[in-house]
Image: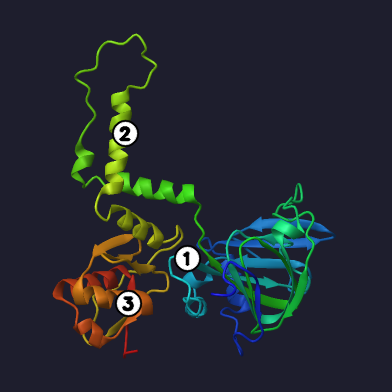
Amino acid sequence: MRRHWQKKPLLVRQALPGVQPPVSRRQLAELAASEDVESRLISRFDGRWALRQGPVAKLLPYSKAGWTVLVQGLDLHLPEARELLDRFRFVPEARLDDLMISYATDGGGVGPHFDSYDVFLIQVQGKRLWRIGRQGMATSGALVEGAPVKLLADFEPEQEFELDAGDMLYLPPGWAHDGIAVGECMTCSVGFRTPWRAELARELLQRLMDDDSRAYQNRMYSDPKQPATSAPGEVPQQLLDFARDATERALKEPLALERALGEALTEPKPRVWFETGDVLPAGMGVALDRRSRMMYDRAHVFLNGESYRAAGRDARLMRVLADQRALSAKEIAALSKGARELLDQWCEDGWVQPVAGTR
C-alpha cells in the first residue's frame, strides 16, 4: 500500500501458492446462464470482436480458441469466491467492490483497455500473458471506432508478464493492459469502488432529502409578503434563500451526512437477495452472509443500507463483526438485550448466519 497503491504496478510471483479456482468450468457456465448473475461473452474470430451480454444460455465449444466469458460479483454467489475476496481486506471495505472471474480459451481476452479503478489480477488456473503500459503516456486514450467493447486504438505496451497459477499483478487506475490466454485459463480480478464526486454528491443529497423524519423538512414554502410583480419570469430571491436554507440544514443536521454515506456504501447491489432464516440459536456464533456489507463510523454501525446508533460494549462488538465478519458465541453473550434482539432480526433477514464454534 505504501509503495504501490495508486502509484505503480506490482507483480508478485506466487502471491497465492497452490491457489484453486473458486469455481469449476461447469459451475461458471451455470452462473453465466442465470438471470441473477451479471455476465458477458466476448470473442474475437477472424479479427472481429463480438460481445454478448448475459445471461449466456450456452457457451461456445471449449475447443474453439479466442473467446472469454466473464462473471461479475462471483463473491455474491460462492463462498470460495468470498474467501478469496476477503484476502484483500487490507483495503477498507468501503473501497472494496467485488471479485470477477474470466474463463478464456487459448488466445481469448477482452483486448487492450484501461480501468478507472485499482485492480488485482490473480491467475487461478493456466497461464495468461499480460502486456501493460501507462495509458496517459503510452497511448492517447482513443478508442477503436465501431468495436462492441472499449478497445484502445493505439496501445503500446511497455512491459510483458506471463502469469502462472498463483501469480498476481496489481495495476493502479489508468494503466492500460491486455491479457491474452495461453491455452485454457481462469483469472480472477479484484475491483474497487471509485465514485465520482458528482455521483456521490447526488446519492448523498437524495438520501438526505428522502429522510422526512427531520423537523426542518416539514416546513412548506410560503410568501405572504410577495408583492405583485412585473417580472414573473424572475426566480424570487426569497425562494432561492428557502432552497439554500433547506440544503444547508440537511448538511448541518448532526451526523446526517455520516449516516447517509454509511447507508450508501453498504447498500446491496441490485441483483442481491437474501434467504430468510430463524432467530439465532443459543450457544451459536454468527458470520456475515457473503452478500452482506457491514461498516461503521464513530457513532453508527451500517448493514445492508441500514444505520444503527451504537455505543459502549455493543458498539465495540458490532465493530468486531464488521471487521472480522464473525462473532463468537462468547462475544454474542456479552451483547445487551437490545443488541441481541437486533442480531436475531438480522438472522431472520438472512443478513447473518449462525455458525458453530468460535474463532
Disc number at residue 95?
A: 1
How many labels, in total? 3
In the drawing, does residue 303 fall left or right of residue 172?
A: left
Q: Furthest residue to the top?
A: 230
Question: Which structural element holds mark 2?
Answer: helix
Tell me which amino acid carries mark 2.
Answer: Ala
Q: Earlier in the sequence, mark 1 or mark 2?
A: 1
Disc number at residue 321?
A: 3
In the drawing, does residue 188 fall left or right of residue 265?
A: right
Quarter of the view holding residue 309: bottom left
Q: Nearer the viewer, residue 79 or 199?
A: 199
Question: Which structural element holds mark 3?
Answer: helix
Residue at x 30%, y 30% (from the top left corner): 241
Graded by Cα atoms within 10 Å as few (under 14), some (14 to 19) or many (20 or more), the crowding at tag 1 reads some
Q: Nearer the viewer, residue 37 or 316?
A: 316
Instruction: Provide the residue designation for mark 2.
Output: 243
Q: Position of residue 310 (x, y in %)?
A: 22, 68
Q: Earlier in the sequence, mark 3 or mark 1?
A: 1
Tell me which amino acid carries mark 3.
Answer: Leu
Q: Earlier in the sequence, mark 2 or mark 3?
A: 2
Tell me which amino acid carries mark 1.
Answer: Arg
Q: Furthest residue to the front?
A: 3
Q: Quadrant of the N terminus?
A: bottom right
Q: Is residue 89 above or below residue 247?
A: below
Q: Nearer the viewer, mark 3 or mark 1?
A: 1
Q: Nearer the viewer, residue 7 or 161?
A: 7
Q: Nearer the viewer, mark 2 or mark 3?
A: 2
Q: Position of residue 156 (x, y in %)?
A: 80, 62
Q: Position of residue 212 (x, y in %)?
A: 24, 45
